[in-house]
């Protein structure tokens, strides 16, 4: 047995013995003779007794206190995880992954003698299907935005990462940079003016918070929100016509993807058949900036308008709709199944369009607003 591994195994076995597990059980689990374990325990006790005889000073006391805290944490991890020390590696990885938010990675890996690199590879390899990772990333987006705005948009990934770490957040600079790029934000520096001007031309804001339309199929706005059902994150994409504030299309999916956005846009276009020049306003999310969306809009002669980098007020109509839907339906109901949740979203949107008066429409419903318009414009009415 490698000397380092032997030392780690000996320490782990003694810790488990001190937590109340018998020598017989430890011998059976670890495949180590009982006589060897008894010898280790004796040596451990001798070391403890020897330490007691040493002169106690503040430094030794602090070191001992830290060691006790660490050992208590390791013992608690082993008890909570419910996974044997000799379990297969994948089983141990799955067990400590569930404790990721409660303990440091260093302590988790030390408890089960797993290299930290192996654990990080496990996390990032399965991040697309990992509920904790998705939630953690969404939380980081909000925290990064706050630090960025508090710095008057000056801080870059390095400084934002440092601030988050000072607040107790476990995050790397690489992850902060990746999320900032996805959000479309960057540090404002004198040398970035050229890049900034280029981005502004590329992602032009045609709407400029002008949420008034004189007729249907003139201005559409779209966004995606997320709602957690049990262990799944459900993403809801909607498209709203600014003339009547009617939700003209919506789709539900398991990821905030280009496919979800495009299928919603295709559904709205096929239903409404707008003329060339329709303004379609969204945020700068990668799902809306994809080549598939760009090619489709070019083909249909739709003008794509973008919100400024992480300025939610530029798309406040959709933000307001999502807030109403969550307050009036999603947060008020405990759904028995995902099918029931999906049905509830369909039902709410139909009610929103046909029964709910809207203050911006002088308390008409979206349906009444469109009916009033088309009653005098029968030749423009969509099929």
Image (tube, rainbow, N blue to C red):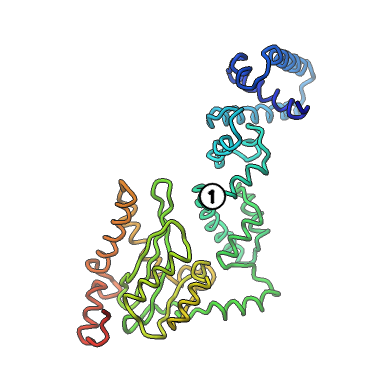
User: Residue 36 at x, y = what percent?
Assistant: 71, 15
Along the viewing direction, whichever of 181 and 310 lies nearer the viewer: 181
What residue is pinned by disc 1?
133
Q: Nearer the viewer, residue 160 or 292?
A: 292
Q: Quadrant of residue 196?
A: bottom right
Q: Residue furthest left?
A: 375
Task: Name the image quarter holding the C terminus.
Answer: bottom left
- Residue at image coords 26%, 73%: 366
Where is residue 250 drawn, in percent x and y? 35, 66
Pick the front one: 315 or 111: 111
Decide if residue 54 is on the left or right side of residue 256: right
Q: Is residue 378 above or below residue 362?
A: below
From the viewer's perspective, is residue 298 above or below residue 188? below
Side of 76 where 70 appears, left or right:
right
Is 22 above or below relative to 119? above
The residue at the point 61 percent across, 63 percent down is 151
Residue 381: quarter of image: bottom left
From the viewer's perspective, is 371 left or right of 239? left
Mark 1, Cα crowd under 10 Å, few <14 / some 14-19 / many 20+, is some
Q: Position of residue 194 (x, y in %)?
A: 66, 79
């Amino acid at each position: 047995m490698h000397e380092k591994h032997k030392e780690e195994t000996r320490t782990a076995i003694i810790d488990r013995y001190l937590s109340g597990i018998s020598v017989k059980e430890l011998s059976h689990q670890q495949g180590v003779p009982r006589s060897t374990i008894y010898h280790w325990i004796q040596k451990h006790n001798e070391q403890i007794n020897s330490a007691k005889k040493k002169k106690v000073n503040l430094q030794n006391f602090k070191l001992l206190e830290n060691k006790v805290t660490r050992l208590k944490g390791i013992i608690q991890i082993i008890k909570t995880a419910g996974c044997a020390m000799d379990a297969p590696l994948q089983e141990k990885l799955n067990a400590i992954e569930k404790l990721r938010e409660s303990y440091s990675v260093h302590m988790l890996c030390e408890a089960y003698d797993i290299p930290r690199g192996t654990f990080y590879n496990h996390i990032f390899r399965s991040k697309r299907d990992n509920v904790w990772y998705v939630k953690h990333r969404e939380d980081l987006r909000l925290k990064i935005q706050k630090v960025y705005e508090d710095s008057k948009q000056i801080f870059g990934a390095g400084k934002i990462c440092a601030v988050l770490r000072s607040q107790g957040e476990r995050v790397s600079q690489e992850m902060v940079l990746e999320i900032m790029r996805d959000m479309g934000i960057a540090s404002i520096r004198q040398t970035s003016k050229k890049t900034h001007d280029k981005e502004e031309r590329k992602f032009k804001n045609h709407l400029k918070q002008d949420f008034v339309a004189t007729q249907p199929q003139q201005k559409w706005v779209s966004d995606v929100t997320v709602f957690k059902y049990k262990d799944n994150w459900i993403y809801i994409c909607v498209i709203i016509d600014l003339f009547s504030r009617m939700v003209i299309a919506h789709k539900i999916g398991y990821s905030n993807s280009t496919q979800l956005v495009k299928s919603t846009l295709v559904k709205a276009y096929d239903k409404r058949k707008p003329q060339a020049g329709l303004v379609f306003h969204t945020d700068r999310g990668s799902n809306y900036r994809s080549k598939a969306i760009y090619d489709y809009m070019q083909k249909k002669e739709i003008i794509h308008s973008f919100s400024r980098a992480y300025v939610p007020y530029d798309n406040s109509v959709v933000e307001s709709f999502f807030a109403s839907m969550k307050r009036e339906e999603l947060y008020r109901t405990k759904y028995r199944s995902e099918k029931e949740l999906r049905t509830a979203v369909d039902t709410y949107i139909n009610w929103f369009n046909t029964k709910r008066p809207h203050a911006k429409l002088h308390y008409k419903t979206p349906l009444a607003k469109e009916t009033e318009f088309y009653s005098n414009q029968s030749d423009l009415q969509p099929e």
